[in-house]
Image (cartoon, rainbow, N blue to C red):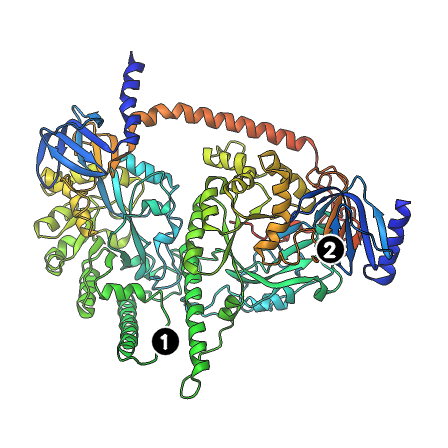
Amino acid sequence: MRRVATLLLLFPLLAAAAGTTTVIQNATVLTVTRGTYHGSILIRDGKIAEAGEKVQVPEGARVIDATGQYVMPGIIDCHSHIAADSINEGAVAVSSMVGIEDVINPDDIDIYRALAGGVTTANILHGSANPIGGKCTVMKMRWGKDAQGLVFEGAMPGIKFALGENPKRSGSPGGFGAPGLRYPASRMGVEDVIREAFTQARAYQQEWRDYQAKLDRHEQAIPPRRDLKLEPLVEVLEGKRYVHAHCYRADEILMLLRVADDFGFKVRTLQHVLEGYKVAKEIAAHGTGASTFSDWWAYKAEAYDAIPYNAAIMVRKGVLVSLNSDSAELMRHLNTEAAKTMKYGGLNETEALSLITINPARQMGIEQRVGSIEPGKDADLTIFDQHPLSNYAKVERVFIDGELYFDRQKDLEERATKEARKKALLDKLKAQEKKDTKKPEPSADKKEETPGAVQ
Amino acid sequence: MKHLIVSLLAAATLSFGQAPGAIALRGARIFTVSGPVLEKGTVLIRNGLIEAVGESIDIPKDAWVVDAQGVTVYPGPIDALSTVGLPETPATPAAPPRSETPASPRAAAQEPAMPLEQGPEFRPFTTTWVRAADLLNPGDRHIEETRSAGFTSVVTFPSSGIFAGEGAFLNLSGEKQGRMVVASPVGQYVTLTTHSFGTYPGSLMGVIAYIRQLSLDADYYRVALQDYAAHPAGHRRPSYDRAVEGLLESPRLLLPAEDAKQIARMLRFADELKHPAVLYGCHEAYKVADLIAKSKVPVLINLKWPERSKDADPDQEESLRTLELRDRAPSAPAALDKAGARFAFYSGGTAPKDVRKALKHAIDAGLSEAAAVRALTLNAAEIYGVADRAGSIAAGKIANLVLVKGSYFDENAKIDSIYIDGVRYEPVPEAPPPDRESRSTPGGIE
């Protein structure tokens, strides 16, 4: 009987691969931006077509009964380092010429594990070894797609900056953290590197403007040499690329905001920002977002003066706040992290959920597409078996663009098949290895005579 | 009788130091590759070239006739990515301490003095201008070893650094440097090697960005030089840049790609670089054969099929994906053939004597013998732009042939002889290699 039930459960899933219409029924829907209701969601062509208490089920639609379950927008992580074959380009103080998009690893199992934690979108950042780091890539966790298939098409490009201990102790020949020779070696140096880079970027920008002016005057000119290091910084100056800046201390936060003001660009988000609560008003005044941890600190000197109220205090001071993972493990329970802000700082349910949905979407400039359950948005949805702010909640299903990318039941069922396949393959290869080693290779273990003697 | 002729021939070869007037290999089964298989044909060799091939060609009076009944004649097999013929260097010579006296001119060329703080304006690990053809060592014992295993040609590249240098298509005659070179330069060997966290580029994305920048610099350099040539008076001259010069004169870039992800990544990158490209490695090509075929980018398949490391922990569990790769890698050539992609082979870390066994694995995994022969010969010649002179048995082409008593793909079938530029060589019994371990593996992808 149980098997029949499973088959029945699977059947609509199989059928749905062909169709593009899905209805999730009888769910508690946490829209984040439009309150909570009990009812249905209609998904068509990868988008949320309707969301309401009563939704007509179109003919041939896949119907998912979510009785007793909770649907929330797919979780968005503003700071992650999964799904990339390299993270840090450490030898240079400014590594803006490199980018995650060149090294996307669609085979990273952490993508699937993030899905299993309800995450559908993540900002994959360069590491924090450089005052100005590499370019970031916003990805959807479309497990199974190739590298380009993961890229969140149309998302604003970003770049990683980093302040404080990491950039000032990196790039040493002895490896990350060893006594270094690379400039900078102090917070003053970090500021100097950023100012110097933007000064160069302005000059580079001017070179291209001069070239354009010559062309406009119909003068003969060849285009300037393209500089991959300075191009992204010009984009920052022109508001075409978001700055996501790793930082901890209040003083360095204020430093960066001053530098940004001096050069006329905006810092889109401060990342980690554990002392953000000390300068929340200034951050809000600058229009900068903050992406922090709930209660993770004291792993280095600059990360001691932290409090679990950080997120809530910044929210109350008008800062656009999100919670991020910076870790493939923490990424799998961002819902629990969000819940902690209710205990520490008294945020309400919607505010807490915003920290991992619509707020990070706004910080990454993708809020028109994702971050809440509203008609017209991408059907990126996570279904929990219990309220996601409960630490007993488990992810049952995850949709991205209306496609089912994670299904707990299916995963459990497939384990045995995969195990068997692996066992069969292992046996086959072992048998082959045995066959191959039966014929000893004549020269394999021969001792070398005088080289060249035979010739 | 046959023996007598053969020894006369050998004597002639020795005494004249080159091929006799003409040689007719008669009655052989001939894989012409560019034409049909001849069941009982004759190849006529004169002056190092194939003068004629066919089932009923006239044998001129001055020709030595070799009775080749029971022998299969193939176009000379080509190891499409090799270091044979180059002076030996340590496996990772990339970043020796700066104070050290370079061991060889080659090592010196690879070590431009660099400040510690580098950006893409510097040229780390770049020796684009180094040409394999200029470094040849005809005394390299690997020449004879490779020839004895049934290869007539190799495409040899300098192999260390990010841009290692320009390759040459070589005949393994191993006598005079100048006679060995069939074509040069035939390509630029590129690796994605990272060196250390403390040296730019120290990451995969850094290497990719560096390659992209050098490519953009080449575009700029070309335009700047043209502009200067048109208006030298009153203009500052562009600086001479040997790194860019070497890149610009390379007809194609060899880019490494082992698994499906890397293949997709490098195909996209090749497209962006706007420089003809060839991928090498490609063991997981069976997963993306259609993508490769669609891109029209040729691939070189490493015949060193993946295997479990000899030192692997027996209790270490391998992933399903790793196991699948090991099981299916030899099916990559068949998949590429089916998809219509162009591919050739290279020995990689395989000892020359084991190459035929490795090819047999590919045939067992579905590759037809005809396709295998073509990949080993004409495909390689086409990929490197020398199909007008090598790669098949056709009148006018270089007389590079291998004669096998049976099938080339039967490792027990004896190689009868090898003709290179019309000169006959006999396989020499194998000498145990003294230092295989220290030899850098071309096309080995980390």
Q: Where residue B329 sits: x, y (%)?
A: 54, 39
Regarding residue B292, the answer to whether it shows in the image is yes
Horizontal side, residue B15 vs residue B275: left or right: right
- Which amino acid does the dot numbered 2 rest on? Ala
Q: Helix, strand, or loop for circle 1?
A: loop
Toward the viewer: A303 or B30? B30
Task: Name the quadrant containing residue A16.
Answer: top left
Task: Mark 1 and mark 2 in contact? Answer it, CB < 8 Å.
Answer: no
Q: Residue at x 34, y 38 (%)?
A: A143
Q: Residues within 10 Å of mark 1 (few under 14, many from 20)?
A: some
Does residue B186 appear left or right of residue A448 in this picture?
Answer: left
Q: In this view, does B225 lie above or below A379?
A: below
Give the CA distance from mark 1 to mark 2: 49 Å
Q: Name the residue under label 1.
A: A222
User: What percent of the width, then of the height, locates residue A92?
Assistant: 38, 63
B155 vs A202, left or right, is right
Residue B374 at x, y = what percent? 62, 46
**Does B410 sit above or below residue A231?**
above
Q: The residue tagged with tag 2: helix, strand or loop?
A: loop
Residue highlighted by disc 2: B399
Q: Mark 1 lies on which chain?
A: A
| A336 to A26, vertically: above or below | below
Residue at 22% across, 34% down = A382
Indicate the quadrant where residue A400 lies: top left
- At a point 23% along the width and 58% down the height, the residue shown is A242
Q: Is A262 situated left or right of B435 in this image?
A: left
Give how far across and how far down residue B414 sits, in percent: 77, 41
Subunit of label 2? B
* Residue B202 at least partly seen: no
Q: Which amino acid does label 1 sit on?
A: Ile
Name the image quarter holding the N terminus of chain B: top right
